[in-house]
């Protein structure tokens, strides 16, 4: 790799917040509000090229990003909820030649409607979600600077595993950014969690998720501008610990690792998320 602006290699980083650290596939009651503010830190000093070959960044380059986001969900009826995500990103790349580049600001606002299609014995839930994406920036180093839409399918359930209460969530979403070179993306994730005690205070979970992004009109990799890097893929694995202080307030600590990729960076992440039900 030549000297990169590494934030351009990490095109999927701004969307990592979509990998929920809690069981987001279960219904929110009518006229109830769920809030989840979170902060995610990511660090990388190597990346995969277009052939998925892992290489260190030149001149001991290092990239770090901090993303703040607010997830909200409001119950309209027993089947419909409103969903929103508002992220703020701060990205920095530097190397030992003195090169230093920073980009910060609001990213892509996501607003959607979730429909709980069906349930089985009120333990397993199927839901559909349509989302509209609106960029809140003019800097290509923060995203594609294009509107888009996503259709997502979620299957979630709860039960018993090794004598413990457990839950799982599986999601797959197809996202299309509009415009002549707007990429189409497949975003997928799966989470399995266990409650460790009878009072439902402590829980642990494991997740795996990823992106596949392609653009037939602009598939060539350009490490200089994030808005032109539309052809990439990555997979990430993570572990989380959650603690419920009350029925209305919980927090989650998560550690993640990029495990495979193409045209993107390899790195580690850590996050803190709060779950608030006013």
Image (cartoon, rainbow, N blue to C red):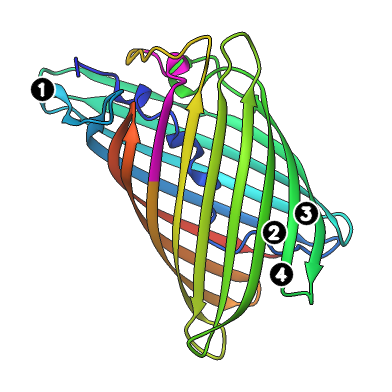
Q: Which of marks 1 and 4 is nearer the N terminus?
A: 1
At a point 60% along the width and 51% down the height, the residue shown is 171
Query: Marks 1/4: CA distance?
Result: 51 Å
Q: Earlier in the sequence, mark 4 or mark 2?
A: 2
Q: Which mark is residue 124?
A: 4
Q: Name the residue under label 3.
A: 74
Q: Residues within 10 Å of mark 4 (few under 14, many from 20)?
A: some
Helix, strand or loop at label 1? It is helix
Helix, strand or loop at label 4? It is strand
The image shows residue 113 at horizontal and vertical percentages of: 78, 44
Helix, strand or loop at label 3? It is strand
Whether residues under marks 3 and 2 lie with C-beta atoms below 8 angstroms apart, the answer is: yes
Find residue 117 and report its image quarter: bottom right
The image shows residue 155 at horizontal and vertical percentages of: 67, 59
Q: Could you tell me which quadrant the C terminus lies in?
A: bottom right
Q: Earlier in the sequence, mark 3 or mark 2?
A: 2
Whether residues under marks 3 and 1 lie with C-beta atoms below 8 angstroms apart, the answer is: no
The image shows residue 137 at horizontal and vertical percentages of: 56, 20
Per the rendered image, the range of residues in magenta is 225-235
From this view, report whether residue 138 is shown above or below residue 28: above
The image shows residue 7 at horizontal and vertical percentages of: 35, 26
Q: Mark 1 points at which residue?
A: 59
């Amino acid at each position: 790799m030549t000297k990169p602006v590494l934030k351009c290699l990490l095109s999927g980083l701004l969307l990592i917040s979509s990998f929920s650290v809690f069981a987001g596939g279960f219904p929110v009651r009518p006229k109830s509000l769920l809030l989840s503010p979170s902060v995610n830190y990511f660090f990388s000093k190597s990346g995969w090229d277009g052939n998925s070959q892992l290489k260190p960044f030149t001149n001991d380059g290092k990239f770090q990003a901090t993303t703040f986001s607010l997830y909200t969900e409001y119950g309209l009826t027993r089947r419909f909820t409103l969903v929103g995500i508002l992220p703020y990103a701060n990205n920095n790349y530097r190397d030992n030649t003195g090169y230093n580049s920073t980009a910060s600001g609001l990213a892509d606002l996501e607003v959607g409607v979730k429909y709980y299609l069906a349930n089985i014995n009120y333990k397993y839930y199927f839901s559909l979600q349509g989302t509209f994406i609106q960029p809140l920036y003019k800097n290509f180093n923060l995203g594609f600077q294009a509107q888009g839409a996503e259709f997502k399918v979620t299957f979630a359930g709860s039960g018993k595993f090794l004598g413990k209460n457990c839950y799982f969530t599986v999601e797959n979403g197809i996202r299309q950014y509009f415009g002549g070179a707007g990429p189409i993306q497949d975003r997928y994730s799966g989470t399995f969690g266990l409650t460790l005690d009878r009072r439902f205070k402590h829980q642990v979970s494991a997740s795996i998720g990823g992106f596949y992004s392609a653009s037939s009109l602009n598939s060539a990799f350009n490490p200089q501008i994030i808005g032109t890097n539309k052809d990439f893929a990555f997979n990430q694995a993570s572990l989380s610990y959650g603690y419920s202080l009350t029925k209305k307030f919980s927090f989650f600590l998560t550690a993640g690792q990029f495990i495979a990729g193409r045209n993107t960076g390899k790195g580690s992440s850590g996050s803190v998320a709060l779950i608030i039900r006013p």
